[in-house]
Image: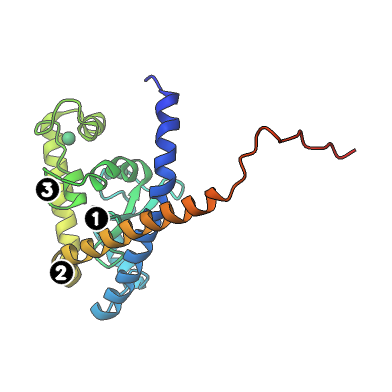
Amino acid sequence: MSFDVAVAFRKSTGRAKSDVANKLVSMFLHEVSRKACVAGGMTVSDPRYAESVVNAFGQQCFYCGKELESDRATVEHLDGMNRFRVGLHVPGNVAMACKRCNNEKRRDDQNPNLYLAENGWESFLSHDGIRCVPSCKTCVYWVSILPDKETRRTSLGVARERVRRFQEPYDRFVHWSANARDSIRQKIEVLYRDCQNFATAEIGKLTAGVALDFASSEAPKSKD
Ligand SMILES: [Zn+2]
Ligand SMILES: [Zn+2]
């Protein structure tokens, strides 16, 4: 695969600014999650929750079924904690996945509009290589893991069903999150916009005070 250095450099400027806003969004979602856990009477840190995750999925990635080793395992939010998916750190939305699936799923989590399913996890497990355009990278990923068409379709269906069964005891969190999503998303948009505006204004003000006197600038004196 060819790599365009110029494009990478161009993108890095925009990303530096949105990273700050995205971090605030994540902090906001964690705080909402904390309150929701209190209201719902259970937290993700509760040992009983970890036990139910292991009961449902064993020591395996709940997407691809690979055995999880400590260096390949990562905490996964079924709906990503970002401004598009508005996922929360609450029971029913947190499990363990392999780093590879976690990484591949980002495309669905960061897609403003999902067309295969309503939720990030469900969308990720719906790329069966049939319904998307041939160039779909997530479909290509699943084809690489499950080359046989029929096996792929069945395995992804089984994985989706397993997630649904796992979520059943946490229905109250799943339903509350779904109902609250639009309202939380609106607040996130305000936070995101305000952060960007603040950053632009403040940085503009401060950079105006940076002296750009190239002409009168001398070479720094050496220390010896
Ligand atoms: Zn996986
Ligand atoms: Zn696809």
Tell which residue pokes out farthest to the top in this image.
Answer: 2
Q: Is residue 160 left or right of residue 22?
A: left
Number of other residues with Cα within 10 Å of mark 3, as a class: few under 14, some 14 to 19, many 20 or more: some
**Quadrant of image for the C terminus:** top right
User: Which of the labelled discs sits on residue 117, or is there none?
Assistant: 3
What distance separates the C-alpha of mark 3 from that of mark 1?
12 Å
- Residue 71 appearing in the image: yes
First reached walking from the N terminus: tag 3 or tag 1: 1
Q: Which residue is mark 1?
A: 79
Q: Quadrant of residue 50?
A: bottom left
Location of the N terminus by quadrant is: top left
Residue wearing tag 2: 171
Looking at marks 3 and 2 on the same chain, the residue that comes earlier in the sequence is marked by 3
Q: In the picture shown, does residue 117 fall above or below 11? A: below
* Local secondary structure at mark 1: loop
Calculate the distance from the C-alpha at mark 3 to the C-alpha at mark 2.
18 Å
